[in-house]
Image (tube, helix red, strand yellow):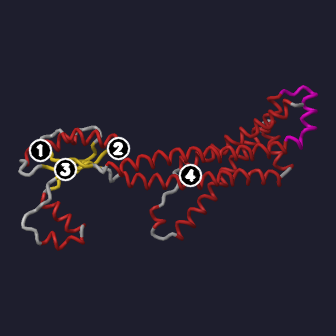
């Protein structure tokens, strides 16, 4: 199948100026590589936050002497709440055994106890979408309405700090991501601009023989898109090599690190294609408006 004229023209530019084309692809690749590295940091940071968020739970301490039937019925009611993932009942004996195991410095004190001072409790784990301070507080208030509940705790201070950390990470990620995207667009725009200036005489002749702006713009847009795709692939390779080296050198810590999913990799190539098209469109459009 014979290639269309815009494709031929775009490929001819690669053959005509291989060094400039290679530099363009490398520039896009390194720009996307920087974005990719930041994305990897953000991805693993969010994974760490999710791990920490799994510890968000509401603990309801039960009054002594509460019948087991009442606790079982209440546990079933709480389990039906939309924000609740799991309800665990911790008896007084289990609470004491856990304290002896976890609080080693007080091991001797717990061993000499005549009576168990620790109450039974219900540990309520929230679903991922509700692991924030507002949802935890609302759930704590609902659970506190049960008559056998003596007190409810959910670590309000550290949950609020976790919320602030998540919000700050989202804002910083958006700002830095946009900054890197603008830099990448500027780089591809400059490289395409150089190509346009090199072919200024050819463009002028094409205008004289009646070529439309769309016809002239086509090869440059395809060239920018191809450079964006190649730059995206190059960035993926560099990200993978960097990730593999870092994971190997960090030992046990590296085993918990996560890499991009196929969807993320596809978005990186698509992003490279997009900035290649946008940079070409801006550069060619600017030239055509002044000729």
C-alpha gap between disc 1 and disc 4: 48 Å
Q: Of the residues tagged 3 and 2, which is closer to the observer?
A: 2
Q: Secondary structure at mark 1?
A: loop
C-alpha gap between disc 3 and disc 1: 11 Å
Q: Of the residues tagged 1 and 4, which is closer to the observer?
A: 1
Q: Which residue is mark 3?
A: 122
Near mark 3 (Cα within 10 A), the count class, few <14, some 14-19 or many ≥20, is many
C-alpha gap between disc 3 and disc 4: 39 Å
Q: Which residue is mark 4?
A: 39
Region rendered in magenta: 196-212
C-alpha gap between disc 2 and disc 4: 27 Å
Q: Is 38 one of the magenta-colored residues?
A: no
The reply to whether dot 1 and dot 4 touch (C-beta < 8 Å) is: no
Q: Name the residue: 12% across, 46% down.
A: 71
Q: Quadrant of the C terminus?
A: top right
Q: Which residue is mark 2?
A: 133
Q: Is 206 one of the magenta-colored residues?
A: yes
Q: Of the residues tagged 2 and 4, which is closer to the observer?
A: 2
Residue 148's disc number: 1
Near mark 4 (Cα within 10 A), the count class, few <14, some 14-19 or many ≥20, is many
Q: Nearer the N terminus, badge 1 or badge 2? A: 2
Q: Name the residue: 28% across, 45% down.
A: 85
Q: Of the residues tagged 3 and 4, which is closer to the observer?
A: 3
Q: Nearer the N terminus, badge 3 or badge 2? A: 3
């Amino acid at each position: 199948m014979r290639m269309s004229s815009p494709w031929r023209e775009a490929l001819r530019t690669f053959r005509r100026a291989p060094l400039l084309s290679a530099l363009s692809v490398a520039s896009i690749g390194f720009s996307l590589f920087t974005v990719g590295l930041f994305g990897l940091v953000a991805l693993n940071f969010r994974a760490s936050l999710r791990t920490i968020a799994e510890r968000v739970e509401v603990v309801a301490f039960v009054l002594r002497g509460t019948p087991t039937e009442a606790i079982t019925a209440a546990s079933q009611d709480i389990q039906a709440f939309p924000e609740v993932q799991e309800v665990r009942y911790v008896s007084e004996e289990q609470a004491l055994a856990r304290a002896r195991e976890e609080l080693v410095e007080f091991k001797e004190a717990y061993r000499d106890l005549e009576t168990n001072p620790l109450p039974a409790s219900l540990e309520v784990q929230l679903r991922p979408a509700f692991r924030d301070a507002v949802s935890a507080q609302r759930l704590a208030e609902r659970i506190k309405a049960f008559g056998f509940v003596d007190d409810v705790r959910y670590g309000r201070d550290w949950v609020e700090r976790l919320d602030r950390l998540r919000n700050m990470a989202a804002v910083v990620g958006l700002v830095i991501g946009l900054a890197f995207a603008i830099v990448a667009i500027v780089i591809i725009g400059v490289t395409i601009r150089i190509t346009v200036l090199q072919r200024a005489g050819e463009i002028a002749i094409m205008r004289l023989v009646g070529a439309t702006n769309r016809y002239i713009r086509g090869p440059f847009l395809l060239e920018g898109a191809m450079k964006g795709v190649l730059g995206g692939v190059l960035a993926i390779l560099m990200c993978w090599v960097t990730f593999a080296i870092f994971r190997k050198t960090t030992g046990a810590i590296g085993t918990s690190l996560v890499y991009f999913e196929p969807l993320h990799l596809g978005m990186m190539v698509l992003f490279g294609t997009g900035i290649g098209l946008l940079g070409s469109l801006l550069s060619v459009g600017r030239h055509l408006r002044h000729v």
